[in-house]
């Protein structure tokens, strides 16, 4: 049974048909013992089939395809890397279903347009980052606020060569959510720097990230 | 968990600072909940040039799991209803500044209004509608602020999965509290509803749905939220009539005790009542000519989606009359 209904398919097509840069969805799965691996692969394939000129899918076996696993720095599955003309470090861990389907579409659209969409002010603020930063945004699929945080994190990854950003679906990775003490979403975690809860407008989100990373010195 | 894949794209009509900077709008609507979005539809149909500024398009409807009293829908989820609202405003040539809040409001010497957003944009308008809604109020007790995101929560649809099969308390006695209880029951939570008032304010039809499945503590106040430094471990409650304090061992406390109006920016701009709500008359006028109020941020009794939407329509028509009367020569 298809995951995307006809109406959603139409909307996806309308959003992605005009993309100017090719996008590849690298899906990492294995067929056994992985909640939603099959569905994540199917989702990527259905989506790409709607706009075959703009979006391609490469399916990788997480246990066997060591080279790709290393190249895209995948440490858990299901995983999805949204890669454009270059790899901006945009990842989804766990299925981007529910509200997060919107985050996936926005990520593909952004990469395919080759533009982060961040304001010039935000982009210049990102100049304060001078070392690698990884943003983990924990979500649940029933959280209407979460896509705002996920997309901002992905935009930052697109705009800064230092930043990678991932959505993590908390229910599929309870041990990680537990480790990072996630009890409310969205929660953005920057390893070694701290974390903050909630979705917020672009300028505030940028400030929170930059302040955490630079220790408030920016 | 049932999987679904529905698109809910943000309204993508960014106002460009350069091109729009000197443009004069007939109406700027501040707030993007049911009141603000309905006002946008009505104003657009009157062909008013309109901008809508909202940092959370959809407003509180987004965090409502189910709506059963918005006419036309016997049952619809809050996010679906908000999605339908935003679909409807997308068909108009409306400027939407989504993901932006208002930083300052002023009336200039030529009587036009200036609206500065927190993203640094400035809009000029002939009229304003204030429709900023309300936000969650936290419990004024020790531990409540400290444990936000670590057991103290406000969005049951978002955070319910973190409390699977856990004991949780819900503070509140209204419809939102009972709806949160239903959300928690879905993930197997052992729910205690704590109502500080004497008697439940929730609709009896809702209360009947949870009555046999949750522990109801009527006329009890939460006096403290306890934790181990990392997360919530319990709540202390005391009966209103002064009985013994009890400790309930819970992992989560969902706070549904009503709301605070988002009117801080209007304090010196229009008259507010004791609750901080914008005072409006039955024709949506505020204390300042050319400025209208609609929805939950106003003094209108009963905060309901349907009422907010109706008020939004009324405010837009009032703003239209004002523009027609004062600017008809232009």
Image (cartoon, coloured by chain):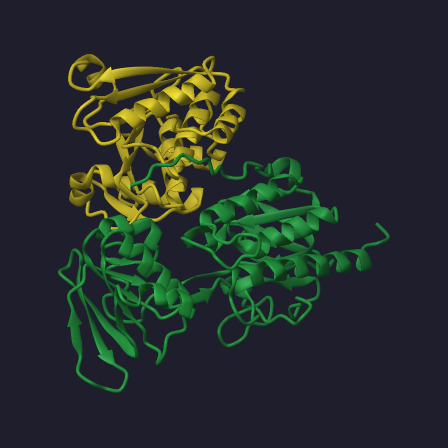
Query: From where the camera sits, is residue B256 visible?
Result: no
Give the quarter of the image for residue B197.
Answer: bottom left
**In this image, B320 relative to B140: left or right?**
right
Query: Where B265 falls versus B13 (above or below)?
Result: below
Q: Is residue B129 shown above or below A213?
A: below
For the C terminus of chain A, give its image quadrant: top left
Residue B216 visible here: yes
Residue at screen point 32% across, 39% down: B2
Q: How many marks?
A: 0
In this rendering, position of residue B297 left or right of residue A160:
right
Q: Please identify which colour was used for chain A in the image.
A: yellow
Q: Residue at 47% across / 52% down in the picture? A: B75
Q: Colour of chain B?
A: green
Name the quadrant of the N terminus of chain A.
top left
Closer to the camera in the image, B294 or A189 = B294
Q: Position of residue B154 (x, y in %)?
A: 34, 58
Residue at x 40% of width, y 21% of height: A46
Residue B35: x, y in percent?
Answer: 58, 57
Q: Based on the displayed image, in which of its 4 quarters is residue A26 positioned?
A: top left
Q: Is residue B25 above or below residue B292?
A: above
| Left or right of residue B35: residue A123 | left
């Amino acid at each position: 049974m298809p995951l995307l209904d006809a109406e959603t398919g139409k909307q996806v097509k309308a959003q992605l048909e005009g993309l100017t840069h090719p996008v590849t969805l690298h899906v990492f799965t294995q067929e056994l013992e992985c909640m939603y691996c099959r569905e994540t692969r199917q989702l990527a394939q259905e989506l790409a089939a709607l706009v075959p000129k703009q979006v391609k899918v490469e399916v990788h076996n997480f246990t066997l395809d060591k080279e790709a696993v290393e190249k895209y720095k995948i440490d858990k599955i299901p995983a999805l890397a949204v890669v454009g003309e270059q790899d901006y470090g945009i990842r989804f861990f766990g299925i981007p279903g529910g509200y997060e389907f919107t985050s996936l579409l926005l990520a593909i659209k952004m990469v395919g347009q080759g533009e982060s969409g961040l304001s010039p002010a935000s982009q210049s603020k990102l100049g304060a980052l001078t070392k690698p930063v990884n943003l983990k945004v924990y979500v649940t699929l029933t959280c209407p606020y979460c896509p705002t945080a996920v997309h901002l994190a992905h935009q930052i990854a697109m705009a800064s060569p230092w930043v990678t950003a991932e959505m993590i679906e908390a229910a599929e990775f309870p041990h990680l959510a537990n480790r990072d003490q996630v009890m409310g979403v969205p929660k953005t975690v920057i390893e070694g720097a701290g974390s903050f809860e909630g979705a917020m407008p672009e300028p505030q989100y940028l400030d929170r990230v930059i302040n955490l990373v630079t220790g408030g010195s920016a | 968990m049932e999987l679904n894949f529905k698109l809910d794209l943000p309204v993508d009509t960014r106002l460009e600072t350069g091109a729009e900077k000197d443009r004069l709008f007939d109406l700027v609507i501040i707030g993007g909940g049911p009141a603000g979005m309905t006002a946008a539809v009505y104003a657009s149909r009157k062909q008013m040039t309109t901008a809508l500024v909202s940092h959370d398009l959809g407003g509180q409807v987004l965090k409502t799991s189910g709506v059963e009293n918005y006419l036309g829908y016997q049952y619809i989820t809050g996010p679906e209803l908000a999605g339908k609202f935003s679909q409807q405003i997308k068909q108009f040539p409306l400027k939407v500044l989504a993901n932006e809040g208002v930083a300052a409001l002023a009336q200039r010497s030529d009587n036009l209004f200036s609206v500065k957003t927190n993203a640094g944009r400035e809009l000029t308008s002939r009229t304003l509608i204030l429709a900023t809604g309300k936000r969650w109020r936290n419990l004024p007790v020790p531990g409540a602020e400290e444990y936000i995101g670590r057991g103290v929560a406000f969005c049951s649809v978002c955070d319910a999965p973190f409390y699977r099969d856990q004991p949780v308390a819900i503070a509140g006695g209204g419809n939102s509290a009972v709806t949160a209880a239903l959300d928690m029951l879905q993930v197997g939570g052992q729910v205690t509803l704590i109502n500080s008032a004497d008697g439940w304010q929730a609709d009896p039809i809702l209360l009947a749905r949870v009555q046999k499945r949750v522990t109801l503590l009527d006329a009890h106040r939460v006096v403290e939220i306890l934790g181990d430094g990392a997360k919530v471990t319990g709540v202390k409650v005391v009966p209103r009539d002064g009985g013994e304090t009890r400790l309930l061992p819970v992992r989560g406390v969902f706070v549904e005790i009503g709301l605070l109006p988002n009117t801080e920016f209007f304090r010196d701009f229009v008259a507010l009542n004791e609750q901080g709500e914008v005072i409006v008359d039955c024709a949506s006028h505020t204390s300042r000519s050319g400025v209208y109020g609609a929805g939950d941020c106003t003094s209108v009794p009963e905060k309901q989606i349907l009422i907010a939407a109706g008020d939004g329509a009324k405010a837009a028509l009032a703003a239209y009359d004002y523009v027609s009367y004062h600017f008809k020569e232009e």
